[in-house]
Image: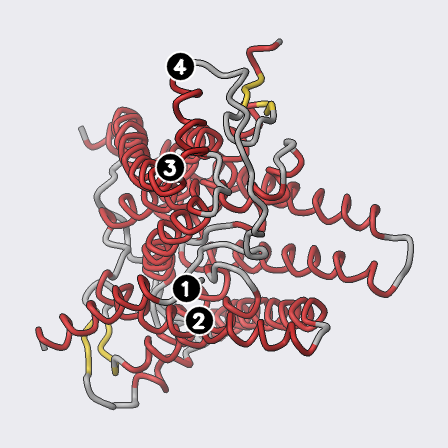
Amino acid sequence: MYKLWTKMTCLAAAAAVFLPKTVIAAGGEPASLLVIVADTRKLSGWEAWFANLYNESHIYFTIVTVVAIPIIGVILGVLADLVMNHIGIDLKSRELSEH
Amino acid sequence: MDWLYVLMPISGVTIFWPGLVILGIGVGIIGGFFGMGGAWMVTPGLNILGFPMAFAIGTDIAHMAGKSLISTMRHGRFGNVDYRLGVIMIIGTVFGFEIGAQMIMWLERIGKVDMIVRWMYVILLVLIAWMVFADVAKKRKMEKELKAKGQDVDKLATGIEWHKTFHKLKIPPMVHFKAAGFTCSAWLPIIISFVTGWLAGILGIGGGLIRMPALIYFIGCPTHIAVGTDLFEVMISGLYGAATYTYKGRTELLAAVIMLCGAAMGAQVGTVATKYIKGYGIRIAFGIAVVGCCISVIMKLIPKYVAGTQVVMDIASTTLILGLVAALSLYILVKMVQGAKQEVAAKKGRA
């Protein structure tokens, strides 16, 4: 059983990596091949750094985005948890309501 | 009032940031409550705020990945996520989606792909809405009959129970899903997720709208588990989608982060509301959302048949979607506040 699970997990991971255009989470047409360049003239500080990163390497830009999103998500989620806990809501259990 | 506007570093447009936060809250509430990404709601909203279409989809997916992560964390702690089921379903979703996407390319070569896809979408949404409301009607009828006989109503009973027939298929390997509370052949979730993935691939949507009812009616998940497990899938596919769209240069991270600030609170509200609104309440609200989505798709089809209605229908469809988001968010928020008040009062009473 353990082997089956290992195989299935590996298969899923490999498919997600190698198959193009799969499991995108939202609708719309595929992005066009149009090249967009960020205008950095009005920007300064981290915004200029970020826009330059976008212009120079989409790979690094992607890595920063994909790493930043879950980290920010977890931080905001934990903060929201603290607020909910402070209100006094039980965040660990719920009543089963159907089968 | 310049402080209310922020310059987006990549797309170069200036956006009213409180609008992004409000949109994030609304979609966070609905996503956390129904277990879906909600691209059909976000994209028109981003467009209205002045986002170029090229960036709207990528930004939406990036924020969706973070929002689903927050909702999955919360649903996970409630015990609403069946991770084993979620992982098995990813296999079917991936292959189904790829075949669906290939079929779309084939349809594009034939022509008229847009019309076929939109009509398929309408038919599917009508079927989902019918399934949900038929289920609700059946459950109410059962309850009425039992009350007439003077018998107690089983609160765990459901209306449509197609999953029981599917569970009788004992094709190995049989797998027990602890959180969902049933044992079935592993092929059942694989086949169902393959079909929902295939439909999502053809329709060019994420699939939460299809997967959630499929998890309930065909696989047999309780509503809460269906919502949590679906969000787990949306989280994984959202991260993958965010990577591909960002690599194509179509994501505005700053906007996604601003939306996430609202979505973090919204997702918590939506998720916690599932504690207070029982399974059938979620199903009815979901049915209403599906009907609204269906009407908006029909509105987009009308200009193909009636000339000169493009602008009117575009405005009407966007108004409908945003109105629906506002109304549903408000309903869920009110229910959550009422439930939380009762819970806190009960706690104080016990202390």
The picture places residue B136, in percent across and down from the top left corner, at: 52, 67
Which sits in the foreground, B178 or B199? B199
Residue type at the position of mark 3: Phe
Circles 3 and 1 on the same subunit: yes
Residue B300: x %, y % from top left: 74, 57
Which residue appears farthest toward the front when viewing the image?
A: A56
Left/right of residue B112 with respect to residue B342 in the rendered view: right
* Measured Cα–Cα span from mark 4 to mark 3: 16 Å
Quadrant including the N terminus of chain A: bottom left
Ranked by sequence position, the earlier of labels 3 and 1 is: 1
The type of residue carrying mark 2 is Glu
Q: Report crowding for label 2: few under 14, some 14 to 19, many 20 or more residues within 10 A (C-alpha).
A: many
| Mark 3 neighbour class, 10 Å CA radius: few under 14, some 14 to 19, many 20 or more | many
Q: Do the residues labelled 1 and 2 touch (CB within 8 Å)?
A: yes
Residues flagged by tags 2 and 3 on a common chain: no
Estimate the x, y position of residue B201 in percent, counting from the top left.
50, 68
Circle 3 SS class: helix
Question: Which residue is under mark 2?
Answer: B98
Residue under label 1: A20
Q: Residue A45 carries which label?
A: 4
Of the 4 image quadrants, the one containing the C terminus of chain A is bottom left
Residue closest to the far left: A2
Tell me what residue is drawn at x 27 percent, y 30 percent.
A75
- For the residues marked 2 and 3, what is the alpha-carbon distance in whole angstroms? 26 Å
Residue A61's tag is 3
